[in-house]
Image (cartoon, rainbow, N blue to C red):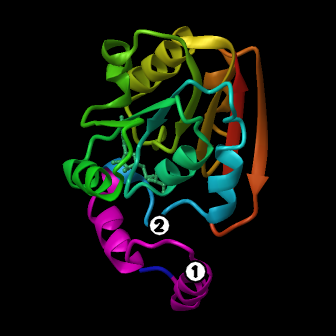
Amino acid sequence: MPDPFFLYFYLKRSTMSTSIFKTFLNFTRNIKTTGAIFETSARVENEICSKIGPHSKLVIEYGTGYGNLTAKILERLPKDGKLIAFEVNEDFVAAVKAKFNDPRLTVVKHSAVELPAYIDQPIQNIVSSIPFTLIPKEEGDAIIQQSHDHMADGGYFSQVLYSKFHLKRFKKHFSKCEVKVVPNIPIEHVYHCLK
Ligand SMILES: C[S@@+](CC[C@H](N)C(=O)[O-])C[C@H]1O[C@@H](n2cnc3c(N)ncnc32)[C@H](O)[C@@H]1O
């Protein structure tokens, strides 16, 4: 169980509309695929979406959960942009489909590794919160490589993780990677990797 004081402060400062307890319970119940017990923080939401702009005609999201990052991406996505979101958990897929009524969004109940089957144009941005620590190494490496191969030059793969440990896996493919450290409990790291 998390520290009750931490939970109290987290609840106080949270801006999420979804019930925090419902999220906490369902993230915990599915810990092997969520890799977290809370949604990413509001500061990470802003940082991880910061590379999305008017040029972002196709954005991909990996790991929607209840759609906190999905909402931020849709805020920044151009009117004629498209967002394809991959999520392995069917309850989260159903929740996100019910939450957003936006013709720019397609939610796919599949792993990020299935990306190539859904892409017919270059991707400008990938926003990912999937837990690379828990995903088998071969599958994780395939996700990074395929993502890179389907991105436009100048595109960004932005990933949030609790450590810098996986950065070298991204550096193998991307020309430049920078990390923004977001002080929190636990500390969150946003990798921005440029193709
Ligand atoms: C840490 S949660 C993040 C949820 C939310 N986007 C956030 O930022 O708080 C990770 C999410 O990735 C999903 N996930 C895990 N492995 C995945 C994969 N291979 N492909 C797509 N989604 C995956 C989990 O089901 C979970 O919803």
Give the answer, above or below, for where 3 lies relative to 99.
Answer: below
Q: Secondary structure at mark 1?
A: helix
**22 magenta-colored:** yes
Q: Amino acid at mark 2?
A: Phe
Q: Quadrant of residue 95?
A: bottom left
Give the image quarter of residue 73: top right
At which x and y percent is residue 116? 37, 13
Q: Report how many numbered discs are placed on residues in the image.
A: 2
Q: Report the residue at 61% width, 52% height from top.
A: 162
Q: Secondary structure at mark 2?
A: loop
Q: Which mark is residue 99?
A: none
Asked if disc 2 is less than 8 Å from ligand 1, the answer is: yes
Q: Which residue is mark 2?
A: 38
Q: Is residue 62 left or right of residue 195?
A: left
**In this picture, which residue range is highlighted in magenta?**
3-32
- Counting residues from the start of the chain, the first of labels 1 and 2 encountered is 1
Which corner quadrant of the image does residue 107 belong to?
top left
Q: Amino acid at mark 1?
A: Tyr
Magenta: predominant secondary structure element?
helix
- Residue at (31% x, 31% y) in the render: 111
Residue 86 located within the stretch drawn in magenta: no
Q: Are marks 1 and 2 in contact (CB under 8 Å)?
A: yes
Q: Which residue is drawn at the image coordinates 52% and 14% (left, top)?
A: 145
Above or below for 103 versus 149: below
Q: Nearer the viewer, residue 178 or 84?
A: 84
Please name the residue shown 33% across and 58% down the image: 99
Residue 175 screen position, x and y as percent: 75, 14
- The residue indicated by pointer 1 is 10
Find the distance from the CA under tag 1 to the CA under tag 2.
9 Å
Q: Residues within 10 Å of mark 1 (few under 14, many from 20)?
A: some
